[in-house]
Image (cartoon, grey):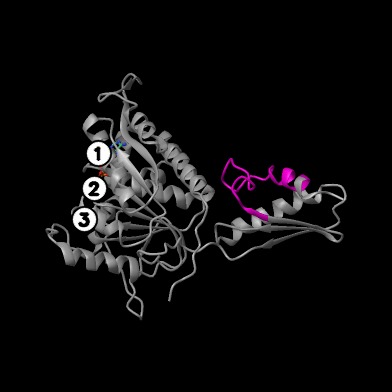
Amino acid sequence: MVTPQQILTELKKVKYPGFSRDIVSFGLIKDVEVGSLGVNVVLAPTTARDEVIEEIRSMVIEVVGKLAGVPKVEVSLSDPPQPARRMQSGPAGIPGVAHVLAVASGKGGVGKSTVAVNLALSLVKLGHRVGLVDADVYGPSVPKMLGLHDRPQATNDKRLIPIDCYGLKVISLGLFVADRTPVIWRGPMINKLLTQFFREVDWGELDFLILDLPPGTGDAQLTITQQVPLTGGVIVTTPQDVALEDVKRGIAMFQQVKTPVLGVIENMSYHICIGCGERGEPFGHGGGSRMAEQFGVPFLGELPLVRAVREAGDAGTPLVVAHPEHADSMAYRAIAARLVEDISARPVEVLPTVH
Ligand SMILES: Nc1ncnc2c1ncn2[C@@H]1O[C@H](COP(=O)(O)OP(=O)(O)OP(=O)(O)O)[C@@H](O)[C@H]1O
Ligand SMILES: [Mg+2]
């Protein structure tokens, strides 16, 4: 009779759909039961997407079924997909939302919103259910980047319906203010709106909710990150020294809310000359990775300064949608895939819901 170990060895040949990593190292196999009637492989899926689970199920049946001495293969699922990580104390999670990721930057204009939008859409392309909250109260730019104009509708029970855009569910403060209305909401007003975004939006089931924070790492940002339990933070920076100093503050901010930093992304890291094709590094390069190393946080990658990125953003169709094969789009996809892998590899802390 085969041993569970032999079966695990076979299962390591099955790649998680859309990833280079196998389902065993993804932590997807909860148990392997070998009985006289056959084998039962128990999966603990981290996604609720039926088609992904089905694909894994049929691949498992195929590889295990080929082993000699296995009369029958069954695949069962352990508990339903993991709910949002709950902390013992602190804010309650958003029902139906598995992971909330915050994108932060120490200062403005580093491309944080561009990164948040393109990352969110890359996660959609990888088959995940994704939402995006534009929490930038000072300059909500997500509607422009996605070409959104309509004010969200509400359900009968007064929950806001996020706008569906290229498969991404979006809600932004910018959708509630007319163009050119000065956004001078302060303190309590901002908090009330954001609380509404977290609590009174009909997100449905989401694998990831991405939060585009306002630039900076002060009190305003801290207040937002305290509203929901975050799975992790992503810090966007540019290569200038001064921006790198800001990374420190970003890390410190996430530490304050006990949120792991999933990584640092260096944006506008270099540019490719259109005329000669040479790589130019106006601000030096590699600072992001050095900084990440120094602080012991992962470096997720560098994104070049590309005119198409700005043009796509200005035109309301982000790069990963307008030019999916562009080198930058691929870089975004790789970063998105890496984030998913890293998150899946983390132990999920599932605590009982406190009533
Ligand atoms: N890699 C890139 N290549 C070229 N242009 C870029 C790149 N990343 C961002 N941009 C452009 O830089 C400008 C600022 O980007 P973005 O609005 O995303 O920054 P931000 O950090 O969110 O700014 P803010 O502080 O205002 O919220 C935009 O015009 C955007 O299109
Ligand atoms: Mg922004």
Where residue 177 appears, x then y in whole percent? 19, 63
Near-viewer residue (219 or 273): 219
Quarter of the C terminus within the rendering? bottom left
Dot 3 surroundings within 10 Å: few (below 14), some, or many (20 or more)? Answer: some
Q: Is mark 3 within 8 Å of ligand 1?
A: no
The residue pinned by badge 1 equals 246
Say whether marks 1 and 2 touch (CB < 8 Å): yes
Dominant secondary structure of the residues highlighted in magenta in the image: loop
Q: Is residue 157 visible?
A: yes
Q: Quadrant of residue 14?
A: top right
Near-viewer residue (135 or 127): 135
- Which residue type does callout 2 highlight? Thr
Up the image or down, 274 lies above or below 71; here it is: above
Where residue 147 appears, x then y in whole percent? 29, 54
The residue pinned by badge 2 equals 217
Residue farthest toward the front in the current orientation of the protein = 88
Q: Quadrant of residue 13?
A: top right
The residue pinned by badge 3 equals 220
Residue 9 drawn in magenta: yes
Mark 1 and mark 2: span between their CA atoms?
A: 8 Å
Circle on res. 200: none
Per the rendered image, the range of residues in magenta is: 6-30
